[in-house]
Amino acid sequence: GDILLNAGENAGSGAGGSVIISGGKTNSEAPVGIVKLIAGSNTPDLENIGMMEINDININIKAGGSASTDGGSVSLESGSSSASNTGTISIASKSSESGGESGIVTLKSGNSASSNTGSVRIESGISNGEQSGDILLNAGENAGSGAGGSVIISGGKTNSEAPVGIVKLIA
């Protein structure tokens, strides 16, 4: 049967109720509790076959912070398949239907106060059979009378005597 968790509705002008599911905390080096949301399966002994949908006005996916070790990581990984293609991961902003601008998609590493910042890597996988995957950088097309988009690749700037970043194109 179904399980429905539904926070209370406010019939007045106040805020609606919240649903909070929390893993257990610890005051030691022991691992903290985990919260798992797993969709249903139609195959015995396999997990995560079903679909999981989060539909809300704003969605934040954050890993936990730490005062004594590395912060948590966020991993998006498509499903595997032993019989066909693996799943696809698509990150996109929705098209604007009102005439406004569509949303911006940003891939960015965080800032650092005293050490290196993280790299941003876009890679295709290794193939042991046919061709390996392509990487396509394609600026937007203008279907009207305006200009098309540009592709700009820039090395990093510096505020010191250190050399600026370089752009390498290697075949």
Image: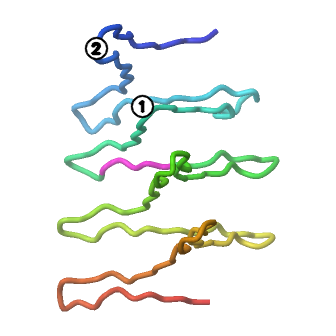
| Residue 120 sits in quarter | bottom left
Near mark 2 (Cα within 10 A), the count class, few <14, some 14-19 or many ≥20, is few
| Residue 65 sits in quarter | top left
Does residue 91 show up magenta in the picture?
A: no
96 vs 59: above or below: below
**Magenta segment boundaries in residue numbering:** 71-75
44 vs 13: above or below: below
Q: Which mark is residue 146?
A: none
Residue drawn at 39 percent across, 63 percent down: 108
Residue drawn at 74 percent across, 46 percent down: 81
Query: Which residue is the site of mark 1?
Result: 34
Which quadrant is home to the N terminus?
Answer: top right
Query: Which numbered disc flags the more N-terminal residue, 2 or 1?
Result: 2
Query: What x and y, as percent, mark residue 69?
Result: 26, 51
Query: What x and y, as percent, mark residue 44?
Result: 75, 27
Give left or right: position of 113 versus 4. Answer: left
Task: Residue type at mark 2: give it.
Answer: Ser
Please name whichever residue, 138 or 102, is drawn nearer the observer in this view of the structure: 102
Query: Which residue is the site of mark 2?
Result: 13
